[in-house]
Image (spheres, rainbow, N blue to C red):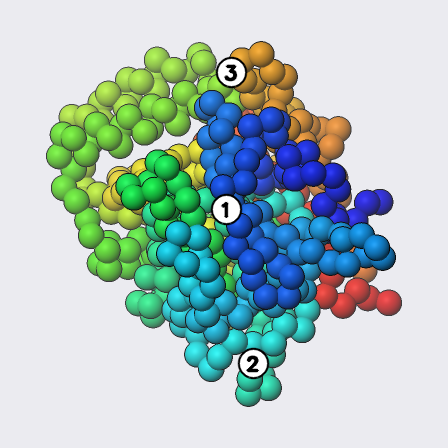
């Protein structure tokens, strides 16, 4: 099997094969800028100019001598890049200049940058790349970290960083503690002054020995256990998190313009869902009627919300209870829209109800998205029954991920694919690659 760390061929042929790349071709890729780091690591800011799929991607890589040649490797899979990233993130370091640069911003971390001892990349990622890191602090104590590298970059603050930092700062244990964030700048002609600024990465507390809510609900169903108590606790956790957000961040009155903005977003999401699941076409008139009725109803204050809430975004942590993850929002929504206050109804515990009430395991037929003149996209093809990982549990000797980002369990627009009773994602038992200490 080919080494996933090795970049084979030129970047414009390698990038389209990566799960985080949203397009299916590299014909319109170009490098806007590069940012050298320590240890031979470097970050490329790669632009995809394909009409309808325009995006800027962060592509870290490492150059390593290999005989008489130079080998290029995917940065997050190398100790060189991870060590350089830790120095920037947790050492509060900086690199580059005002146009192309990066600055580590400490949030809850103190004591200096730790020394990397081991790291592994989680498999199955789609939107980002998450790295589980074990490191040693300057005082000799160990620290387990979850470092997320954002692949698709956006001008503006990433809610995954901002919202979880706010919740943790308020003293809530319903989210992992945020340690630091890496804020970057890169050329972007669409930005106000030609330079985009946003989050490149975030380092958080790693939560070990956990199960996500989907797995907990599924196990309860298989064992015939009552899930009602844990469902109530999940509702309480949801309420606590959103109460903190409403108190700590600005809210807004739901005036006519705000209502129309929220409903327009919902209509667009309904259209995208129908494009992915054609059977939803028959319900479009009813969906439109419900949304139209919402124009005239009573609305609470608009506030910041999770934005992509389903059972795969919640972990059951020993002696801590439910912990919510991945506040980045739905990946198909623009970043500016994800940062706006919206209706709390968008993050109701009811979004988890289909999975909670009928968590029967099943195989699904992949929904395929077609662009004009093209076949199914790469991501849709990868999730087809022929290529989806088996839902059978791995060997007891195979270590599993205990904390994964939402991108490994991403839904379409609802919390479950229509008619499947499970999140639209790889099996929760899908093991990650590159273990800490493989069992003998």
Q: Which residue is mark 2?
A: 137
Disc 1 versus disc 3: nearer the observer:
1
Q: Secondary structure at mark 3?
A: helix
* Observer-nearest of 428 and 434: 434
Seen from this angle, which residue lies furthest front? Answer: 68
| Residue 324 in which image quadrant | bottom left
Disc 2 element: loop
Pick whichever of labels 2 and 3 is earlier in the sequence.
2
95 left or right of 368? left
Rounded to the nearest angstrom, the CA distance separating label 1 from label 2 is 33 Å
Residue 251 placement (x, y as % from top left): 19, 49
Task: Look at mark 3 in the image and give the residue it sits on.
Answer: 279
- Mark 2 and mark 3 in contact? Answer it, CB < 8 Å: no
Q: From mark 1 to mark 3, how far is it between C-alphas?
A: 44 Å
In the image, residue 278 sits, relative to residue 255, either above or below, namely above
Task: Tell me which label, 1 or 3, sits earlier in the chain.
Answer: 1
Taking the spot 43% from the left edge, 48% from the top edge, the residue there is 186
Quadrant location, the C terminus = bottom right
114 horizontally vs 91: left or right: right
Mark 1: few/some/many CA within 10 Å (<14, 14-19, 20+): some
In the structure shown, which secondary structural element does the residue marked by tag 1 occupy? strand
Q: Position of residue 405 (x, y in %)?
A: 54, 51
Q: Nearer the viewer, residue 25 or 279?
A: 25
**The N terminus - image quarter:** top right
Name the outermost residue toward the bottom: 139
Residue lying at 60% horizontally and 26% vertically, measured from the top left: 27
Q: Residue at x 55, y 48 (%)?
A: 44
Residue 239: x, y in percent?
A: 32, 54
Residue closer to the observer: 312 or 46: 46
Residue picked out by circle 1: 33
Work out whether residue 184 can be spotted.
yes
């Amino acid at each position: 099997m080919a080494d996933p760390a090795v970049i084979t061929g030129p970047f414009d042929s390698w990038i389209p094969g990566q799960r985080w790349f949203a397009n299916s071709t590299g014909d319109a890729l170009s490098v806007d800028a590069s940012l050298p780091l320590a240890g031979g690591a470097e970050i490329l800011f790669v632009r995809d100019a394909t009409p309808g799929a325009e995006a800027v991607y962060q592509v870290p890589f490492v150059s390593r001598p290999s005989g008489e040649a130079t080998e290029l490797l995917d940065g997050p899979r190398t100790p060189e890049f991870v060590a350089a990233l830790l120095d920037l993130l947790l050492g509060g370091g900086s690199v580059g200049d005002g146009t192309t640069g990066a600055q580590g911003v400490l949030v809850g971390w103190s004591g200096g940058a730790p020394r990397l001892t081991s790291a592994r990349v989680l498999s199955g990622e789609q939107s980002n790349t998450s790295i589980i890191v074990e490191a040693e602090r300057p005082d000799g104590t160990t620290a387990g970290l979850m470092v997320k590298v954002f692949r698709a970059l956006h001008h503006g603050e990433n809610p995954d960083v901002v919202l979880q930092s706010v919740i943790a700062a308020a003293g809530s244990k319903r989210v992992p503690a945020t340690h630091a964030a890496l804020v970057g700048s890169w050329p972007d002609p669409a930005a106000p002054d030609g330079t985009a600024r946003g989050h490149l990465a975030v380092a958080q507390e790693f939560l070990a020995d956990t199960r996500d809510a989907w797995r907990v609900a599924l196990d309860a169903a298989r064992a015939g256990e009552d899930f009602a108590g844990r469902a109530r606790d999940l509702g309480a956790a949801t309420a606590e998190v959103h109460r903190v957000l409403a108190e700590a961040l600005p809210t807004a009155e739901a005036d006519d313009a705000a209502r129309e903005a929220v409903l327009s977003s919902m209509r667009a999401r309904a259209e995208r869902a129908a494009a992915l699941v054609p059977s939803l076409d028959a319900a479009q008139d009813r969906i439109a009627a419900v949304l139209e009725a919402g124009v005239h109803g009573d609305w609470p204050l608009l506030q910041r919300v999770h934005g992509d809430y389903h059972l795969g975004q919640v972990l059951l942590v020993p002696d801590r209870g439910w912990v919510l993850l991945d506040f980045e929002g739905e990946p198909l929504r623009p970043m500016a829209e994800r940062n706006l206050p919206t209706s709390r109804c968008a993050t109701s515990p009811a979004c988890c109800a289909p999975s909670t009430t009928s968590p029967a395991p099943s195989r699904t037929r992949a929904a395929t998205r077609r662009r004009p003149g093209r076949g199914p996209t790469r991501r849709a093809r990868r999730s087809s029954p022929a290529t989806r990982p088996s839902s059978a549990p791995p060997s007891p000797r195979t270590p599993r991920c205990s904390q994964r980002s939402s991108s490994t369990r991403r839904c379409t627009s609802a919390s479950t694919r229509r008619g499947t009773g499970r999140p639209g994602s790889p099996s929760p038992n899908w093991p990650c690659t590159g273990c800490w200490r493989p069992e003998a």
